[in-house]
Amino acid sequence: MDTIKKRQNAGVRKPDIVRNFYQVILEEGIEGASIGKVAKRMGIHPSLIIHYFQNKENLIVALVDYIIRRAGEIYRELIVQSGDPGTRLRSLVAIFFSEAWYGMSDLGGDFAILSLSGREPRVDARLREMYALLKQLIVGELEKIFKEGGITVRDPKRAAEIIISMYEGYRHFKHFYIEEGDAEKFREDMIASAMAALTNN
Amino acid sequence: MDTIKKRQNAGVRKPDIVRNFYQVILEEGIEGASIGKVAKRMGIHPSLIIHYFQNKENLIVALVDYIIRRAGEIYRELIVQSGDPGTRLRSLVAIFFSEAWYGMSDLGGDFAILSLSGREPRVDARLREMYALLKQLIVGELEKIFKEGGITVRDPKRAAEIIISMYEGYRHFKHFYIEEGDAEKFREDMIASAMAALTNN
DNA sequence: ATTTATTAACTGAACATTCATTTAATTAAA
DNA sequence: TTTAATTAAATGAATGTTCAGTTAATAAAT
């Protein structure tokens, strides 16, 4: 029977609160997300949220942790998939411009969190950790590829940083200046440009 | 004498309110920016802000208008400066990775507004307009350059879009994964990568 | 196996504050 | 004297948080 379990333990309830908080942010923005709305949506009392997180700031940090942890998992999944031998470099680059990568998170949520990073040091620190992890993963892949194939690269770390800059710009901003019908062609052109930028570096 | 003029007319007061609203957002984020705080900071009554903007949403839209209009002015200024004959393409690209361009607006403010665009159609529309203008400016410059020099480019519009994606990614995200000491070298490498991506396209 | 003690999950009500907004009145400039 | 700028006063709803209490699950003792 799937009657609504009343009493949940912290291990279930806490992440559940975080997830619902994220959902409210997606629907109403960071400026419209309140503890009260999260509680109402879950059918619990606002003070239960305070009980677990003490204050709203901690809840926000917990949310950032949640998102970043999830992102880290997807990083590993997607990057590992690029294991075919021949054109490995291209397929690695292609990942970052793929639908799977693009749809990894909600852009509105991304911007909401990014807007916090300037004022909340804990958010900034976590974002840096996330990018450090990602960079490290890319560097690892690049080194593997370059060791096998004849391609040489001056600095894989720098190459990784360029890839990240390119795909972040693509991912977060293309929507503002690329029309629907041109999306797929632009994607291919961006991959080509990234390749040109990398092999030239 | 610079005594505080009491009664201002709408032409002065309205943009003044918008500017102060932006300042509050920079200091406290979009979620911490309220009409009351803006009023207090200006030494006026909150209802005066309502009088001019009817509601908070309109104030936000007015802010976006303000920011975008200012950005448009800076676009023209900076791009026109690239008027030396020889290496015009490179100097054009360099503009987008320059300090002047980078410091054009506050990143925290950028993200705050970008986070609105998903839920507020008027904000989204204005951002699209802004990028359309920018794209047009770049295309115009590229065509001039290509007509003179021997360089050929398949599609200047696409070239402009790639430049925008690259510099937006650089501008908004580099801070998370580039260390202070490496900033200038990274800037040069990004310019080189952009050039490689463009001339290859 | 049943009672007892302890911990954890959760609610209720009240808190002062702030919020955006409305309506009416007042002041100054044209 | 008409018009525009500005404030005053008041609104109800929502904000985050506190505190004291209640209910349920778990562990220990009998």
Image (cartoon, coloured by chain):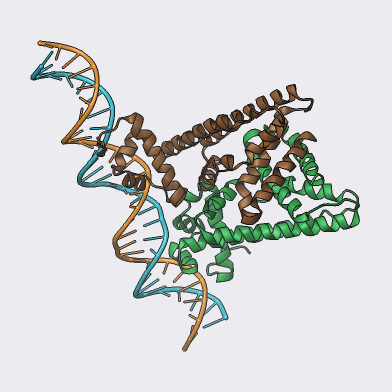
Chain colours: A brown, B green, C cyan, D orange
The answer to whether one can see residue B181 in this image is: no
- The reply, left or right, for residue B31 in relation to residue B3 is left
* Camera-nearest residue between B129 and A149: A149
Residue B85, given in percent of the width and then of the height, sits at 90, 53
Q: Measuring 76% from the left and 25% from the top, which residue is drawn there?
A: A149
Q: Is residue B130 above or below residue B110?
A: below
* Camera-nearest residue between A57 and B45: A57
Picture quadrant of residue C27: bottom left
Q: Is residue A54 above or below residue B60?
A: above
- The reply, left or right, for residue D15 in relation to residue B195 is left
Residue B150, given in percent of the width and then of the height, sits at 91, 52
The answer to whether one can see residue B69 in this image is: yes
- The reply, left or right, for residue B16 in relation to residue B148 is left
Picture quadrant of residue B129: bottom right
Q: Measuring 68% from the left and 49% from the top, which residue is drawn there?
A: A186
Residue C25, given in percent of the width and then of the height, sits at 36, 75
Q: Measuring 73% from the left and 60% from the top, which residue is drawn there?
A: B136
Q: Quadrant of the N terminus of chain B?
A: bottom right
Q: In this view, does A71 lie above or below B124?
A: above
How many discs appear?
A: 0
- The reply, left or right, for residue A147 in relation to residue B31 is right
Residue B106, given in percent of the width and then of the height, sits at 62, 48
* Camera-nearest residue between A99 and B149: A99
Q: In this view, does A152 lie above or below B122?
A: above
